[in-house]
Image (cartoon, rainbow, N blue to C red):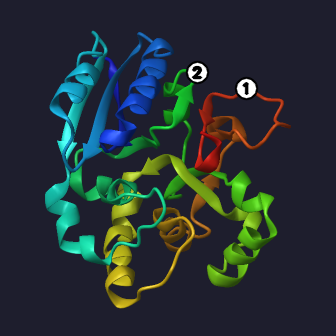
């Protein structure tokens, strides 16, 4: 039997057109040697638009919609949201508990174009690290963001990572009790964050991540990268 690679996206109705592009690009670069199971985490989506995305399935690519309303509702009032952020940014924090059958998974933001076979990312060994990540070029690009990372979060700005691409060691995520710690911080404190879910993950997983080649989360702000941009991320204001 072919090995199954679990892949997760989060989306609301506004992001469905971009999600469709991301999934299509993933499919076009998928290897016939693997099965790809794509999960779309959401709290309710337009049925007609969703059906178009689900129809993109093919022999070795399964696409399923997963409603996480029951998970997010108990903490919804405490979630820090601003600008264009919606509750969907927090869904990735619950993958480990919602899918105990998986030991490892990939999480991708919906504003990513996939240029290479995602199975190569999945094969990277994490050892005891919780996540495989890429440092965030946007945080590193501005003095105020660098100060925020170092003075508010206590993370050296060059080690502050972007949460739009995560290679997740789900066994370790559960062992380190990351979800419970996140909910505890959320219920105990209420403070402004720059990148809400990302800031929590940086603090909770500090020094327990593997930094990957930047080509696995090539951000559009960075014009100097000369390697292979396997995943191009149109994050923040560069969409």
Q: Is mark 2 on a helix, strand or loop?
A: loop
Image quadrant containing the N terminus: top left
C-beta proximity under 8 Å, tags 1 and 2 = yes
Q: Which mark is residue 116?
A: 2
Task: Judge whether 213 appears above or below 47 on screen.
Answer: below
Which residue is nearer to you in this view: 136 or 234? 234
Which residue lies at the image location 86% right of the left edge and 37% below the top edge?
224
Percent position (x, y) of residue 89? 40, 56
Q: In this view, does 137 lie to the left or right of 117?
A: right
Q: Where is residue 143 in the image (x, y as percent from the top left)?
A: 81, 69
Quarter where residue 66 is shown:
top left
The dot on residue 228 is 1
In the rendered image, which quarter contains the C terminus? top right
Q: Can you give x and y, in whole percent of width and height, for residue 179 in the image?
A: 33, 68
In which quadrant of the rendered view does residue 188 lie?
Answer: bottom left
What is the distance, in whole Å, between disc 1 and disc 2 at their CAs? 9 Å
Residue 234 relative to residue 31: left or right: right
- In the displayed structure, 19 sits above or below 100; it is above
Question: 191 or 46, which is in the foreground?
Answer: 46
Q: Can residue 125 be seen in this view?
A: yes
Residue 93: image x %, image y %? 36, 60
- Mark 1 is surrounded, within 10 Å at the Cα level, by few (under 14), some (14 to 19) or many (20 or more) other residues, namely some
* Residue at (64, 82) in percent of width and height: 152
The reply to whether residue 127 is visible in this rendering is no
SS for tag 1? loop
Q: Identify the residue at horizontal 39%, vertical 25% (top origin).
A: 20
Q: Earlier in the sequence, mark 1 or mark 2?
A: 2
- Residue found 28% across the figure and 23% down from its top: 53
């Amino acid at each position: 039997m072919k090995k199954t690679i679990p892949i997760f996206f989060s989306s609301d109705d506004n992001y469905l057109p971009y999600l469709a592009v991301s999934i299509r690009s993933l499919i076009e670069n998928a290897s016939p040697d693997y099965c790809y199971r794509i999960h779309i985490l959401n709290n309710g989506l337009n049925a007609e638009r969703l059906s178009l995305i689900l129809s993109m399935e093919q022999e070795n690519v399964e696409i399923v919609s997963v409603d996480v309303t029951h998970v997010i509702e108990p903490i919804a009032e405490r979630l820090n949201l601003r600008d264009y952020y919606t509750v969907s940014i927090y869904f990735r924090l619950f993958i480990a508990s919602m899918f105990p059958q998986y030991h490892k998974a990939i999480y991708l933001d919906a504003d990513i174009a996939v240029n290479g076979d995602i199975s190569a990312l999945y094969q990277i060994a994490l050892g005891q690290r919780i996540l495989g990540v890429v440092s965030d070029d946007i945080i590193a690009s501005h003095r105020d963001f660098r100060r925020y990372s170092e003075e508010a979060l206590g993370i050296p700005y060059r080690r502050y990572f972007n949460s739009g691409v995560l290679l997740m060691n789900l066994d370790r995520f559960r062992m380190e009790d990351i979800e419970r710690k996140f909910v505890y911080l959320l219920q105990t404190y209420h403070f402004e964050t720059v990148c809400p879910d990302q800031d929590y993950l940086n603090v909770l997983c500090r020094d327990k991540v593997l930094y990957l080649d930047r080509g696995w989360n090539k951000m559009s702000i960075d014009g100097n990268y000369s390697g292979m941009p396997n995943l191009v991320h149109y994050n923040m204001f560069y969409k």
